[in-house]
Image (tube, rainbow, N blue to C red):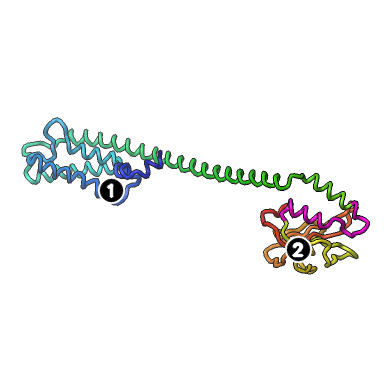
Amino acid sequence: MLSNLGDNRLARFLAPPKLGAMAWLEAPLLVVMAVLVGFLVRPDDPLIFQGGIRWSIVVVLLVALRYGSLLGSLGMLTLLLAWFACKALGLYPGLAFPELTFLGGYIIVLITGEFADMWRVRLDRAESRAGYTLDRLQNLTQRHVLLRLSHDRLEENLLVRPYTVRDALLSLRDVMMDESHSEVLPAGDELLNLLADYCQLQRGGLYAVTGGGINPEPVALLGQNAPLDLDDRLLKHAFESRQMAHVQMAGEGYGGIYWVAAPVMNSGGQLIGMVVVERMPFLSIHQ
């Protein structure tokens, strides 16, 4: 509702949100126009001070309601100057200065202006709170959309891959036990396929470690990979530290082609292989 009020042209015209330079000109001009209209209606009483209602003071009240107490005081000063101008023109002969009229009118203008200032401050606070609430709502909406997309992705993964990680590891163990006597790193292809499913690997290879070094001939490959670069800094770090290393740990000066290098250890803690990843989604780089 506040946003609709701020976009309403009529509301902006009646109650401008900010006091610009035109407001300082408009406030006295409205009083001067009211006096000119008084000259047309009552040439002998242009300020309309004689009668039941002081209509010229009503114009100053409207200025105070529109702009506040400060510009309302300016309008009252303009009306006071109009009185002395009328006296200089020979109007109101024998009429003393209406001090009670100006004093009472000025008090009412101050009250009206303070009322306008108070509600302008309240409206600004309400708009600030509404803007903050709208930002929070947008953030919550975006998080809800991301959560919904994540939920849909999980459902899709469950439909495409109905088996669990436990089942995949058990089947991988069975394959390794069957081929453990004939191959150096048995079930290498199955291991890379498992990593491709659950870690979203796109290109990578499994290499055996023999004689204290990495054999550049791959045991298993996933996608089209370049020849193994044994001098790569990321690969050397993973080989020497016996811990997984990824591109975020390599620093800004790293210019290699590998994203992840993960050592393969046996049950005795001996390094027997190395998994090298050339391409994978950046958001999938985690332990």
Q: Is residue 240 visible?
A: no
Q: Going 79% across and 62% down the picture, which residue do you hit?
A: 221
> Residue shown at 82%/48% (left/top)?
169
- x then y, percent, for residue 70: 29, 43
From the viewer's perspective, is 172 left or right of 3? Answer: right
Residue 269 visible in the current orientation: yes
Q: Is residue 56 above or below residue 283?
A: above
Q: Image point 91% across, 55% down: which residue? A: 180
| Dot 2: element | helix
Residue sitting at the far right: 181
**Number of on-image labels:** 2
Asked if the stretch drawn in magenta spans residue 179, the answer is: yes
Q: Position of residue 219 (x, y in %)?
A: 84, 62
Image quadrant where residue 245 sits: bottom right
Where residue 210 appears, as percent x and y from the top left, is 89, 64
Q: Within 10 angstroms of label 1, few (less than 14), some, or many (20 or more) residues? A: some
Q: Which residue is mark 2?
A: 234
In the rendered structure, which segment of residues is drawn in magenta? 177-200
Q: Determine whether, in the image, residue 230 is placed left or right of residue 63.
A: right
Q: How far across and down, in percent of the image, does residue 241 sit?
A: 81, 59
- Using a 10 Å C-alpha cutoff, classify the residue at mark 2 as few (fewer than 14 neighbours), some (14 to 19) or many (20 or more): many
Q: Looking at the rendered structure, which numbered label has been put on residue 78?
A: none
Instruction: Please tell me whether residue 50 belongs to the stretch shown in magenta.
Output: no
How far, Cα to Cα, is label 1 from label 2? Answer: 68 Å
Q: Image check: 241 left or right of 89?
A: right
Name the residue tied to disc 1.
23
